[in-house]
Image (tube, rainbow, N blue to C red):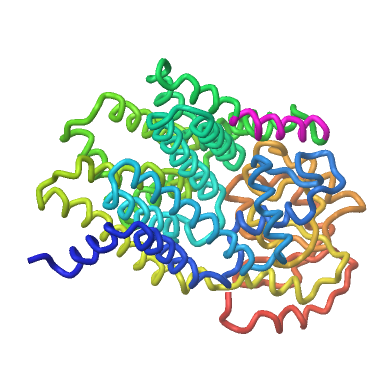
Amino acid sequence: MRTAPARLWAWLADRPGSSLTAGLLLAAGLRLPFVAAPFGVDEGGYLYIAQHWPGPGHWLYGDQWVDRPPALLLLFKTVVLLGSSPVAMRLVAIAVVCVLVASAWYAGRRLAGGDGALAASLCAAALGSNPALGGSELMSDGVGAMFVMLSFALLLAAISAHDDSPGRRAVALAGLAGCAGVLAFLSKQSAVVAMVVAVVVLGARSRRHWSLLLGYAVGALVPLAATLAWAAEGPGVAMLANALYTFRVASVRVVESSTSHAPSGRFGTYVRVLVVSGLGFSLGHLAYDMLTRRRSWLLRGTVAVAAACLASVIVASLNWYVHYWLAVVPLAAVGVALAFVPAERTWRARMIPRAVVAATVLASVANVALQLPVNLASPAMARFVAAAARPRDTMMVLWGQPNLLEETGLRTPYPYSWSLPVRVEDPHLQLFADLLAGPRAPTWLLDVGRSNAWHLETPRVARLIARRYHVAAVVCGHDILLRDGVRRSLGAGAAAVPLGRC
């Protein structure tokens, strides 16, 4: 006699619409508790840039510099058009994860029927919306993963259509797969796994699928050509290449030579998250499945290449942010689906992948309960400055946390709002010191306590700050500096930060 969970699984697997709906509801349900949460660090920073782009300035996005491709900023421009509120941000994020889930469902169904579709959709929903992986926010890694999964699904659809009846439909689907693969790269420049997998799969069958390979290449050229045309007319192709490649190479060298303990400290958290998020269950089972079961050389090779590609880009970054794991979600979802191929399996073999999916879902639900109180906390420093500032005031954060710019609604005269670009592009703070010494010096300086951590302070900057600024308030242990000679109603700022709220 089958247990209730087994009967529920069988019922959903036999009904394609119900299994897809279950995945979509799970993804949305895990994100809805955070729908009104304040912007994350990257969310707020990207939104700030999108709000003022296009605009005056000679950097990639007007007067602000960021090492992200334009497709990601276009998505954040959508948030701007919807009102720039946290709710608008979260609704766009839900739409992104729903595309991820639907693509995983389709890929799973193509690979392993109803069981594969259900497993892949639930796995993608749980991991793609897991707050321990940054899944409660609209992250560049999550957007890239969505396009990667969409490219996988379209590639499988193209191969299936070509095997059934070679023709224009199959080639068109391959073209869409190529377009999605490049959009993944144009959302997160390290998200190249979709293109790598397509080259492996279609290249291995070039005689049979040469038309699909051609269609994929043509589809890939469309967004790439559009991006190059935009760059040529605007900031320049050299500026785009610097943001997507040159800067990344330089940043790796900076991180390698850094004496800060931040990356090594994040590595421990990075490894722990692999377990507590449930992602380790899926990846561990995929490795076990590939090593112990009979698989075609093409399948084994494709999985190995995809895993190697993902591992190399993560390791190469050396930063170990937990949201990097979101890039692995498509591989984890497809891997769980592959466990149901072939369909003729023993009862025990069927239960193991189902247990993996259940454990992944439960881990994600548990992480929502644990992370919700933390993520709903509003940034007190931003509330203070927003209440005390006047409309034409400007602000600079020392160093990082560009979300505070968005929360205060103030502009910044300094082009580097993340700490890593500061260390790469202005390592001796020459540009920043010139700014402090000139007439465009920021009205407010927010010290979030990272200047010493990154060894960014210089004698000249320290002298300029001491000469031109004073501590207006200390909020949550951080100094809020106001330029000398500027009068502001600090009582209004203090009232905006109730006692004990940080």
Q: Residue at x 34, y 47 (%)?
A: 109
Residue 86 in the image, given as x and y percentages of width and height:
63, 67
Above or below — where is 489 with respect to 124? below
In the image, 165 versus 436, the foreground residue is 165
User: In which quadrant of the rendered view does residue 303 lie?
Assistant: top left
**Which residue is rendered at x = 14% and y = 48% of the image?**
349
Can residue 261 be seen here? The reply is no
Percent x, y of residue 157? 43, 38
**Magenta-colored stretch includes residue 226:** yes
Question: In the image as oriented, which residue stretches furthest toward the left?
Answer: 1
Task: Indicate the position of residue 404 as horizontal and vertical percent values.
Answer: 68, 62
Q: Is residue 478 magenta-colored?
A: no
Q: Is residue 58 left or right of residue 396?
A: right
Residue placed most toward the observer, 109 or 370: 109
Bounds of the magenta segment: 219-233
Which SS type dominates the magenta stretch?
helix
Please name the residue shown 78% across and 60% down the image.
395
Numbered marks: total: 0
Kindly identify the residue that appears in the image at 44 percent across and 41 percent down.
Answer: 153
Give 86 or 113, whichever is nearer the viewer: 113
Q: Is residue 46 left or right of residue 57?
A: left
114 versus 406 height, above or below: above
